Image (tube, helix red, strand yellow):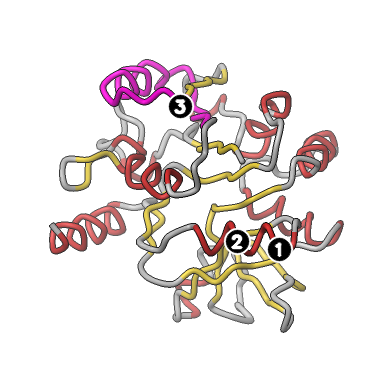
Amino acid sequence: MQAIILAGGFAKRLWPLTLEKPKPLLPINDKPIIEYLLEKIDELNVENIIVSTNMKFKNNFERWLSSTGRKNVRIIAEESTKEEEKLGAIKALSRLSDEVVEDCLIAAGDNIFTESLLGFKKMFEKLKSPMICLYDVREPELAKNYSIAVLEDDDRIVDFVEKPKEPKTTLIGTCLYIFPKEVFRKLDEYVRMNKDCDAPGKFIEWLCKEMPVYGYKMHGMWWDIGTVKSYEDAKRYFAGKR
């Protein structure tokens, strides 16, 4: 298995914190957010990890990578230098299709969570179908800000809706996926159809209509570092765990 970490955004909601520093490199307890994610990926014995970013932040990531001494991580940058030029997560993934030679874990670089990914991988190895990590936010108002998933008894996703006005459930999709290699052909097809190439949830919504997609319910704690509040919440939690 290989891995791609999506880190091509400009994080405008976190300005000025992210004007000159990419969100995944913001510190929590003096350690960048991305390193918490890499520690989880390390448990899966992944030898080939790509960090997909943009030209504005390429040097930031290269300096960070040089400081870690890691040999299993590569930085690949698409050409955008500002928000108006960015490809979007799905188009950026599609551009990396030639780099994908085996089943692939895909994770947003601003995901931070406490549960191991070993159970997620084990479920994928059993089903060999596209998988997405799900998390119960427990509050319908919160669920409106995310993609929501409705599952069958066998954990197949039968309904997946990006930012619903009236959520059927509080089980939301995180930007943590495992795709069989062949799903990247579906990514290319989706991009050619000129669909929304920024929100990964829109692709998952479409993919669920094309083939079986399964959900893995994540427990523990999870944060999508999209706002100053979620960033501060995560910092407080890990400060207490120090």
In the rendered image, the quadrant that contains the N terminus is top right
Q: Label 3 crowding class (10 Å Cα cut-off): few <14, some 14-19, many 20+?
A: some
The kind of residue on which mark 2 rests is Lys
Give me the C-alpha separation between circle 1 and circle 3.
27 Å
Q: Which residues are magenta?
A: 49-73
* Vertical position of residue 157 compared to residue 71: above or below: below
Badge nearest the viewer, 2 or 3: 2
On whether residue 205 falls in the magenta region, the answer is no
Q: Is residue 54 magenta?
A: yes
Q: CA distance from mark 1 to mark 2?
A: 6 Å
Q: Between tags 1 and 3, which lies in front?
A: 1
Q: Residue at x 69, y 26 (%)?
A: 95
Residue 182 is tagged as none
Of callouts 2 and 3, which one flags the residue occurring earlier in the amino acid sequence?
3
Residue 73 bears which disc, if any?
3
Label 2: how many residues lie within 10 Å, few (<14), some (14-19) or many (20+)? few
Name the residue tied to disc 1. Answer: 126
**Which residue is located at x 82 percent, y 37 percent?**
185
As drawn, the label of residue 122 is: 2
Instruction: Find residue 99 and report its horizontal and vertical position in percent.
Output: 67, 25
Looking at the rendering, which quadrant does residue 190 occupy?
top right
Q: Name the spot of residue 154 as percent of width and height, x first.
A: 73, 78
